Amino acid sequence: MILVDEPTWPAHGRLWSHLASDTSFAELHAFAARIGLPPRAFDGDHYDLVEDRHAEAVAAGAVPTTSRAIVAALHAAGLRRRKTSRLAR
């Protein structure tokens, strides 16, 4: 399942969401490609999604949830990468 949190993360003068999968990176990358997210939006275990695209992701099937639920789902699926390991990619 693809999960998306509310756009509450500020950066570059905008608010951002996290888009993640509770199943696999293959599922996540396929969904991101389907809605036209560029590969540079991938941040190790999730995609950063600008607030203007949140509704589009939900309309395409992403399930709205909390940031905490995304982190828990990533851990449960074995997909969570710590910030330090994401930077080393």
Image (cartoon, grey):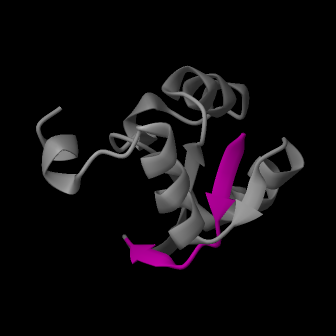
Specify the farthest residue to the front.
76
Q: Residue at x 18, y 32 (%)?
A: 89
> Residue 64, relative to residue 42: is it above or below?
below
State left or right for residue 68 relative to residue 63: left
Query: Is 37 in front, or is 58?
Result: 58
Q: Residue at x 41, y 38 (%)?
A: 78
Q: Is residue 79 visible?
A: yes
State left or right for residue 76 relative to residue 6: left
Q: How many marks?
A: 0
Q: Position of residue 37 (x, y in %)?
A: 58, 36
Name which quarter of the figure residue 24 lies in: top right
State left or right for residue 9 relative to residue 24: left
Q: Position of residue 18 (x, y in %)?
A: 53, 58
Q: Is residue 13 visible?
A: no
> Residue 38, relative to residue 8: is it above or below?
above
Name which quarter of the figure residue 21 lies in: top right
Give the quarter of the figure containing the N terminus. top right
The stretch of residues the image draws in magenta is 1-11
Q: Residue at x 70, y 66 (%)?
A: 65
> Residue 5, relative to residue 79: is it above or below?
below
Q: Is residue 2 magenta?
A: yes
Q: Position of residue 28 (x, y in %)?
A: 58, 32
> Residue 88, relative to residue 13: is it above or below?
above
Specify the farthest residue to the right.
59
For the stretch drawn in magenta, what is the main secondary structure? strand
Q: Position of residue 74 (x, y in %)?
A: 48, 48
Query: Is 25 in front, or is 8?
Result: 25
Q: Is residue 70 magenta?
A: no
Q: Residue at x 44, y 30 (%)?
A: 39
